[in-house]
Image: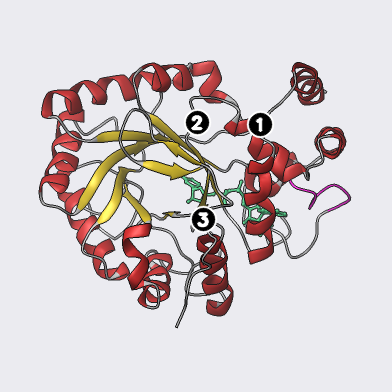
Amino acid sequence: MYIANSGRYQGMVYRRCGTSGLKLPAVSLGLWRNFGAQGNYANMEAMVHTAFDLGITHFDLANNYGHPYNGSAEENFGRILRDMRGYRDEMCISTKAGYDMWEGPYGDRNGSRKYLIASLDQSLKRMQLDYVDIFYHHIYDPDTPAEETALALDQIVRQGKALYVGISNYNREQTAAIRQIFRELHTPFIINQPSYSMLNRWIEDDHLDEYAQENGIGLAVFSPLYQGFLTDKYLHGIPQDSRVGRGETWLGDQLDDAMRARLQKLNEIAAGRGQTLSQTALAWILHNPAVTTVLVGASRPEQITENAACIRNLDFSAEEIALIEDALRQ
Ligand SMILES: NC(=O)c1ccc[n+]([C@@H]2O[C@H](COP(=O)([O-])OP(=O)(O)OC[C@H]3O[C@@H](n4cnc5c(N)ncnc54)[C@H](OP(=O)(O)O)[C@@H]3O)[C@@H](O)[C@H]2O)c1
């Protein structure tokens, strides 16, 4: 039986999600990779326990996470939760629907009421939960009216199957459009989940971060380490046992000499701050006041421990920011 570390809340920072009442840990754990049926269950369990022991109370899932079959990450997470039931009210559990999930016209990439409601019911069964804390529409669907998606999410909340709702992979304009509908419905829409990192700054170009902050919407950012580039892992080559080495990411081709030189420079700046590269990369994101939490992935517990320690130094001098901008322009 798992018993949580009694000092778990001392080591984490909690940030209000937009203007909602919900606080999320600055560092959250994402279960996209390494939690599927093909993974090592003992390692998955150790990662979830390590995270919770560090005060990481927020776990991010989706209906389609897990390899080799969609939903296996939720199944494994549900199994891990069996020994953690007593801590359910100390956890914030998120899931999503929107990408391809099951065969036929109702489970492919879309935002229909038919898909979202059925999918959340399946997710709750897989995780053996009565409700999730946040349910997201996973990716903008130009073919479904925003009213339909919003009404489905609103109904899910009113049925008690989710406490809050969010959207993911929506740009500023798409966010503004659906927000208006949620406001009319009084839906607890509190969060947007975009990708964002030192190496992927589209939300700044789109001004999505400013928009979210001005309108009280939290941001949970995904792939904050650019799938592992912003760690010390690829500084001197491509280890076999890495996401790039295993061919599990489409980003591998970007790991050329110029990228490695940039990462080396960033690594030196991080060392000057007394941090590892991953810690500085995460702190840099959290330095953006629009961001509530970074959703970090991991393949082993030690990575979670290293990453969570980023909160010990979230401040940047103007000089450090300039050095980072310089390195990123290289
Ligand atoms: N909404 C969406 O569309 C969407 C899309 C993608 C992800 N997400 C969410 O965001 C979460 C995180 O995404 P991500 O996994 O791409 O994020 P990431 O944090 O950028 O990358 C995580 C990977 O980097 C490596 N890593 C992490 N910490 C490390 C450390 N300290 N030292 C060395 N390597 C380290 C590990 O890969 P190795 O295997 O190489 O060790 C780990 O699996 C997902 O789990 C999911 O919850 C959402």
Label located before the other in sequence (1 or 2): 1
Say which amino acid is labelled 2: Val
Q: Alpha-carbon neighbours of circle 1 within 10 Å: few (<14), some, or many (≥20)?
A: many
Q: Which mark is residue 55?
A: 3
Q: Quadrant of residue 240?
A: bottom right
Q: Position of residue 154 (x, y in %)?
A: 15, 39
Left or right: 303 as drawn, with respect to 81: right
Residue at image x 31%, y 44%?
Answer: 136
| Callout 3: SS | loop
Residue topped by disc 1: 284
Q: Are marks 2 and 3 in contact (CB under 8 Å)?
A: no
Answer above or below: position of 8 versus 12: below
Foreground disc of the pair 2, 3: 3
Residue at left 13%, top 23%? 184
Could you say where residue 200 lies in the image, as x and y percent from the top left?
Answer: 61, 30
Highlighted magenta segment, given as a residue range: 231-237
